[in-house]
Image (cartoon, rainbow, N blue to C red):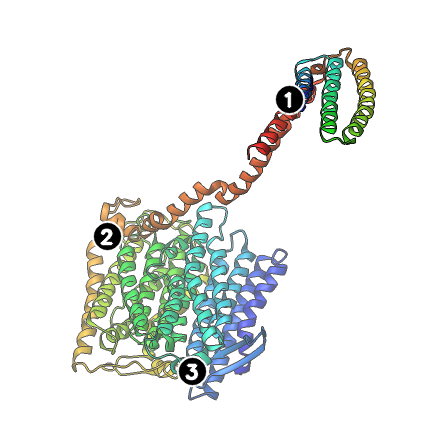
Amino acid sequence: MKELLWLVVALPFAGALILALTGKKLSRMAVAIVGVGSISLAAIIAVGVGLGFLHDNPSGAAFDQTLWQWIDVFGFSPRIALHLDAVSLTFVFVVTFVAALIHLYSAPFMWKEEGYARFFLYMNLFVGFMLLLVLADNLILLYLGWEGVGLCSYLLIGFWYKDPANGYAARKAFIVTRVGDTAMVIGLFLLFTNFHTLNIQAILIAAPDAWPVGSGLAVTTAFLLLGGAIGKSAQFPLQVWLPDAMAGPSPVSALIHAATMVTAGVYLIARTHVLFSLAPVVQSIVAVIGAITLIMGGLAALYQHDIKRVLAYSTMSQIGYMFLALGVGAWSAAIFHFMIHAFFKALLFMAAGTVIWVMRDEHNMFRMGGLWKKLPVVFWTFLVGACALSALPLITAGFYSKDEILWLAYASDKGSAILWLAGIIGAFLTALYTFRMVFLTFFGSAKAEPTQRPDIGMTIPLVTLAVLSLVGGFIQLPANMGHVTLFADFIQQTLPVTVIRSVGRYTELLAQLMAGILALVGAGIAFKLYYNKPFPAAVPVRNGWQRFFYQGWDIDQLYDTLIVNPIVFLSRIDKDDVIDRCYSGLAYTATWLNGALSATQNGRLRWYAMVLAIGTIITLTILYYP
Amino acid sequence: MTIMTEQEIGLAAILFFLGLTGVLVRRNVIFMLMSVEVMLNAAGLAFIVGGSAWGKADGQVMLIFILAMAAAEVSVGLALIIQLYHKFKSDDADSVDKMSG
């Protein structure tokens, strides 16, 4: 069964190809069948492949499938080959499963839009590239998928391209991630010059022998790869593109900017974990970046009024948790949180998308309110997602995944109390902004009436993901609560085990209690501040600090001042191209000399004679008085 | 009374500059042609003086060349002057400055 692995990647591409060639002629129903069908089939085959892999490789030995030789020049010979191990299987499972649900949701959601076939074409293409990214056995194929998902992200953010603002948001996302990608490419060059191969497993085996821990090359390479990861995963300081990426349709935000693409950075770091272990400095930078981003995103989310922007900042913040986990060496905790986050954040985005859909493109939470009676399915699923996001203790999956990260941020050998503190402050902020969103959107007085009912195709994915957001956590429970380690055992077939330093006996329980209580306190404060309060149905008035947080800590303004404006200024000066001026100067001089010389050819005979005489006199003078 | 070589050369120079001045200040083309003839003869005189000073016949040979060339030049020059007069009904050299660079 696992030999069908190539089909998992090929099916989305095939769907995209069919839609690209015949999309204009197909009816909407046929487009939906091709678009949703290809991904669903890929998901079903992925389950089969996963079962086959678990059955044949119980010890976790990787399964490689070489499709064909891609390039072969001067020792540079990457293959089109797929590498399936515990980590990539987890990603393949999450990507195909969540993508299939989101495609199913998109079919009714986008029904009335122009470019229905174009939408499914881009979405299928995206899933294909994302699967290529997580299954690639060499870094150059991974990079192909990496740029492919970036391209699809650009195309889908700018899907409603008739509004120039959406095009601007798409370009911003593309260019900002390109900054990180450039660093990553240089990292790949470094790896190739040192190891003469880009095969990931070969590099991971060769690196510890070639590079001592903390050597300059290891640190540089890890740092450059980290650059690519933070660009793609919207981490500080390259996080500015993610909130604007919400210009795309809601299913796009759910699939690309919450569940899959933005976690590609997490995947890259987990995949090349040996390089990061060789560069402890960079690994602690990963943790610090995660800690900074999770607090930044949490505070920014607290002051938004656009429901999707709350979720965008929340995504940044949650990926910050994954980076924090990677930074302290809690590899399996990061992957676990990625999986649970994919479930509840895709759920939240789709539920928010449904709310926006039934309210006819209303994004402002202050203009909603009182929806819980009118949209019961959406409300209850959204509430489950919100509980999982704010990690309400014991019942939600989010609690188990986030608690593991928080615990290891303190207890792992690379952890510290400061990282734990940042995580726990972030957990409090998460509960606060999440329930602020819930209370503003679904409670209080109704400010507008929903105009359409959500379709059955939209509610099925919501309910499925809501169930997963509740029970998904029970495959991995903390040591003092049942100690189930199914997920960690599975991931640790591929990634190293987290080293835990010795801590007091009740420290873990204390940390769990604090995390749980803070989440409840955050939800309680949100209840106190936002439940049934008569807010005006408009964009809230903000004072200086609130505006600072609302604009994402003014990082955009900072970059405008530091980078964008100087470049615009320089290009305005150089509008006429300074170098070109030198060459046009030559031409001007030649033309001027031509004019001066031809002016002497005036047709006056006596003038010619005079010039001859003067010339003779000058020549004679020079000859006699040299 | 012997005539000094320097005086002879001086005479040739004076004649040459008289001719040059004529070319430069006269506007009538016939007078300009005549002035050119004066300059040619000044040059011829200089050759004769040189030949006699060194006791060689070369100077006289050069004079014969110059006379032959002057005859040819005058015939061409007069033909041009007739064409000029035909076209512009004028013998003023400045009336044909229609080239403007």
Do the residues at discs 2 and 1 belong to one chain? yes
Dot 3 corresponds to which residue?
A205
Single out the mark in the foreground, 2 or 3.
3
Dot 2 corresponds to which residue?
A532
> Gap in Å between the C-alphas at discs 2 and 1?
105 Å
Q: Residue at x 58, y 73 (%)?
A: A71
The kind of residue tagged 2 is Asn
The kind of residue tagged 1 is Met
A322 w.r.t. A173: above or below: below
Observer-nearest of A607 and A163: A607
A344 w.r.t. A372: above or below: below
From the viewer's perspective, tell me whether residue A579 is left or right of residue A237.
Answer: right
> Gap in Å between the C-alphas at discs 2 and 3?
59 Å
Quarter of the rendering occupied by the C terminus of chain A = top right
Count neighbours of disc 3 (C-alpha within 10 A) and say few if under 14, some if 14 to 19, many if 20 or more. few
Observer-nearest of A290 and A604: A604
- The image position of residue A48, as x and y in percent, is 50, 80
| Residue A394, label in figure | none
- The image position of residue A428, as x and y in percent, is 22, 63
Q: Residue at x 26, y 83 (%)?
A: A482
- The image position of residue A557, as x and y in percent, is 33, 48
- The image position of residue A307, as x and y in percent, is 34, 54
Dot 1 corresponds to which residue?
A610
The reply to whether residue B100 is visible in this rendering is no
Single out the mark in the foreground, 1 or 3.
1
A455 w.r.t. A489: above or below: above
Query: Residue A29 falls in which quadrant of the image?
Result: bottom right
The kind of residue tagged 3 is Ile
